[in-house]
Each structure stands twice: as structure tokens, then as C-alpha cells.
Image (cartoon, coloured by chain):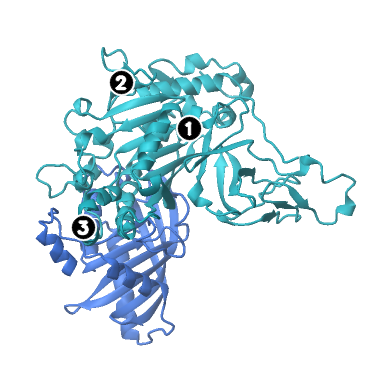
Amino acid sequence: MNISTFSDLARRDWDALVREDRVHRSIYTDPAIFELEMTHVFGAVWVYLAHESQVPKDDDFVTARLGLRPIIVLRDMNGKLRALYNRCTHRGARICRQERGSARAFQCPYHGWTYFNTGKLRGVPWPEGYACDFKDPQYNLAQVPRVESYRGFIFGTLNEAAPPLPEYLGPAARPIDQWLDRHPGGRVAVREANRLKFKGNWKLAYDNAADGYHVIFSHRSLLEMENRGEKDPSKGMSFYAGKPDEAPMYVQYLGHGHHFKDKRPNVAKRPGALWEMEAAHPGMEHYESAIRRKLGDKAARALDLAASEPVNINIFPNLSILGNHIQVIEPLAVDETHTTWYATAVVDEAGEFDGAADDINALRMRTQEAFPNFGEVDDATNFEEIQKGLAACEDEWVYMHRGLGVPGRVKGEPDGTLKAPATDEVFMREHMREWKRLMSSPPRVAVTRLP
Amino acid sequence: METVDEFAAQGGRHAAPVSYVDDAYYRRLLDDFSRWPQVEVQEPVVRERCRSVLEREARLLDQGRFEDWLALYAPRCAYWVPATPAAADPRREVTVSFDDRRRLEDRIYRLRTGSAWSQAPASRTVRLVSNVEVFENASGYLTRSNFLIAEFRAGETRMLAGWSGHRLAQHAGQWLIEVKQVNLIDCDQNLRNPSIVF
């Protein structure tokens, strides 16, 4: 099965590539399929762009990508969230080269064309040399036509026919709400990130995002490290040992490619139980004492906020809320991907925690560094090794059939979601089905420009 | 020490030694590594002593002798790899890595499990340490040095570059590393397999 050109793809038999129990290696390795994904997937659905706490004030901006498109996500001079194409309408140079900042206007360094942060062309040098009318909207910056925030998470889509964002999130909104509502004021602030990359296809990261089958093997070194000196391993993800499919945790497919790995049922339902599962972290003793001293009865709840929330909420195609992280998956090439693990901090404007928010965050920064340091590096290595393994072109298939056909394993819920034991691959099969649906039909992709 | 005792009084549950990291510890790190002294130490003996600690450290890491490497560190020490070029307060921001001694022991323990896949097989490295400047500090010396690490792993060789700040002090007659701050030039960019000790 050789796939070489874009025109071949128009005739591609997606049913042959994505089957019930397996997918073809080429969906991870073929540059033409990757190119098509950038429109058929990343052009068709709501893509996560940034968090509102990264652009708190008017004129604040961060740069991002929508697929491969360079984007400036900003709050314009009127407070409106926009996602401008970071591409001068004149000759195509990126007009903004800073990763974040505050700007009311952007001037292209190449020939000096200048744009307001609404996307409107402000002016060009020596306009008398042009016969055209620069009031023509075609000279304003292209922008993502639909940009919406769901409780701080900013998404954009190029697809006029995409459903409204809440409908796209569907049942995934509930775990997001719960994740936010455990924090004071129901919100978090995005901080710096643990930024990683790997030489492999972006879907390898998304396929792994709810994978409960790999934990005990891929993360053996992390689990051994966290439980060194423990009589009974109880720290971190120790609950995957033994028979994880009999544990109360579960994986749930939520539709539109989204899924949810919910490990919370493994944790005792009392304040402080989550914190007790944390392994050792720098500063743990001092800050725990400080929080207990300051907060008394409320301390256990506060400490739970410094602990890693045991959920993976994966919003197709590029957002994973994991623990306390907001992880963004960015495809760069068919075999190159960035995964950026934004840390989040507790914001306690109402003073619910009596000035202890700084102590909580001092702990929470350390707990958040642990997995990127001691877990994700091993995942990324395995992703790279998959990419290398898939060079074996005659060995065509990648299996994801764990749980398929086993009676009673996958259960349909009244809301249309599917639930299965923690190590089941039903979530992968379902997001691949969604991927196939998207790849099979060209979306109506369009940019807008201010009039 | 007060906070450590408090923790012990609560029946501290960690088998490993308790962490000495507290607000005062973080504040001193920020002080020492944000205001570099202006005057360099001139005595050749001192400069040579500091340089030899840095070179020994580089060699032990290149040789994968992590336990011997950790023996160069003071009992209360920090290994700090900021995630931004202007190192932010680690209490407010995540870092690439922030290890106290217990977490350094964890790091080495993990690398020794044989199932740290990001280091199986292990990277081969050679480190060049140069441009060493030595400054006097209240409790010892601060050094600033540049590094270039050539790393070979999984069929590829790559370069990691940056500068390190070390705080050195005498402990029972031995010059030990109290803090190492590693400033990768690309610390705020997406890093591929940052699983070696820099």
C-alpha cells in the first residue's frame, strides 16, 4: 500500500486504512496524509489555542499554531478575543516574532505594513506608490472566523459549519467543569510550562492520552522511584499494579474524538486522601506544615490542590488536561511534535484559603514538574521508537483492539458515551473512527477579514 | 530546622530524609543567582580550586558515575534548571527541573532502575566547561561557567549549550556544591528528551 501523492489521497479508501481493530501505519508516516490532516482535522474542528489567563488584559497576545498556521491569539483593544493569522498580507512574513507580550498594533519588519490588533490594516509606507485602495478588506489580516472561550479555554475553528463550541465539547464539558470547580473561584491561571518535543507523529501523543495499558510498563521507573522506601507501594499511579481493570477507575469515550480517563474513583473520598498519594517533592514538609498551621480544618482540601488531580481529559485533537497541567499537542511535521505542559496555579482572589495560596502554589509547581521529568520523557522515547518501528513498511498494521469483542467490557451510557475498564483501547478506536470521518469529507474552511 | 521538626512531630511519612526547602531557602537562591557580584576573585589557588570542582563534576557525569557526582554536593543542595532565560521564582513558576537532595537521589534511583526508557540505552556525553569566572559570596564562592554538552543517543549526536552558576562552600574541610543553576540557551523552548543531568 503505497501512498505518495496528494491526488492519490483524494481517492484514498479511508475504510481500508482505519479498520475496526487496527489502523494502517501510513496514517502516522505519510507526509501527504499529514498535509491533509492540517485541513481536514485541524481546519474542521475546534482547536485549542490558548488560555484566557495568558491574555488577561486588552492588547495582550501570545503566539500559537492552528495546525501549522502561525496565529496570534490576543485580546484586542476592545477586549475581544481574536486569533489573527501571523502573516503579513503583503508578502507573507510573520508580523509578530515575540512569543508573548502586549501590543496595540503590529508592524511587519519587512516593509513596515502596520496592523491594529483587530486585524485591520493601519497603513503602509509611501501609499502614493500604490494605485489600489487600502480600505479594501483584502488587505486586512486574515483571522480565524470563530474564536470562543469555554471557561477560560480559548478555541478557534476555521469551519463555518462546525457546531457551537459547547456542543462540540458535549459531555466533555462536565469533567472540565469539575476540574475547574475544585479550585477557588472555579478557575486557574496558566504559568510557565514544561516543554517537550519528540520525533514522531502527533497522534502518538493523542493515542497515549487515555492509555491505561502502558502505565505499569512505560512508567515502571517512575513508580519504583516514587515508592522507594515505601512498604506498600501507594504513591502516584501505584493503583495500576495488580489488576487495573478491576479497579474502580475507568476510561470513557465522550464523542467528537474526546475522552476521559477518570482515576478519581481510586482515591478515598475524604479531603487529604489525594495529597497522601503524592510521593516526595522538594519543600513538601515545610509547605505542608505552613498550610496546616494557617488553615486548620481547611488544610486537607488545600493540600489536595497541590496534588495531581487524577484525571486525563482529552479534547480532540490537541488538548489534554492531565493532572494539574494543560497539555497542548502541536504537530510540526508528520514525524515531529511538540507537547507543551502548561503548569496551572491556584488563584484565590476571594481569600478562601486565607493567604495560603502562595504556599499551595509553591508545592504545586514541584508536583507538576515531576511527571514531565520522570514520566513523559519515557513516553516521548516510546513515541519516537514507534515512529522508527513504523519504518518497517511491509508490516502494515497498528493494533488497538484491546477490549474489542470481550463481552461486557464496553458499556454504552444513557448520554451516548462509552465506558470501559482502565486499560481498554476503546477510546483509541473511537477517536480513530472520528478521524476517519473527518478525513473522508473536506470541511468548509474559510478565514475572515475585517470589513 | 523548625519546620522539619514540626513535620517529624506529625509523624512525617517519608522514609527518605525530609526536605530542607522552605521560603528562606528559595529566597536565598533568588538572591544569590540574580545579583552577581561585580568583582572577580583573583587568587589563582581559589580559581583553580573552583575550576577543578567544575571539571570533576563534568567528568563524573560523562562517566555516568552519578553517586560519585552527588558526593560533590553539600547535604543541603539544589539542582535548578529554570524554564525561562531570566530564572523565575520557583515558588511561582515551574522549572525544567528543581531538585533538592532527596529528588536528586530519586533522579539517580530512577536512572538506575534499568527501566528509565529515555536513558535505556544511556546517552553518551562529553562536556566542555569553559569561561569560568569566580566571585566571592557571603558563605563561599559563586562561579559562572559556560558549557557545551555533546550528547550521542539512539543514533544521533546533538549539542546542548548554556551557562551554569555554581555556589560552592566548604563543608568539613571539603569544597562542595551547594547549588547548581543550569541555564540552557533554549530553556524556554520545547526540549527533546531532557533526561540527562545537565
**Residue placed under numbered mark 3 in the picture:** A292
**Residue placed under numbered mark 2 in the picture:** A402
Q: x, y (%) of residue A6?
A: 62, 24
Q: Chain of mark 3?
A: A
Q: Colour of chain B?
A: blue
Q: x, y (%) of residue A192?
A: 43, 54
| Mark closer to the chain start, 3 or 1 | 3
Circles 1 and 2: CB atoms closer than 8 Å: no
Q: Colour of chain A?
A: cyan
In front: label 1 or label 2: 1
* Horizontal relation, residue B44 to residue A83: left or right: left
Residue sticking out furthest to the bottom: B43
Looking at the image, is B106 positioned above or below residue A375?
below
Label 2 environment density (alpha carbons within 10 Å; few <14, some 14–19, many ≥20): some
A271 vs B7, nearest the viewer: A271
Q: Chain of mark 2?
A: A
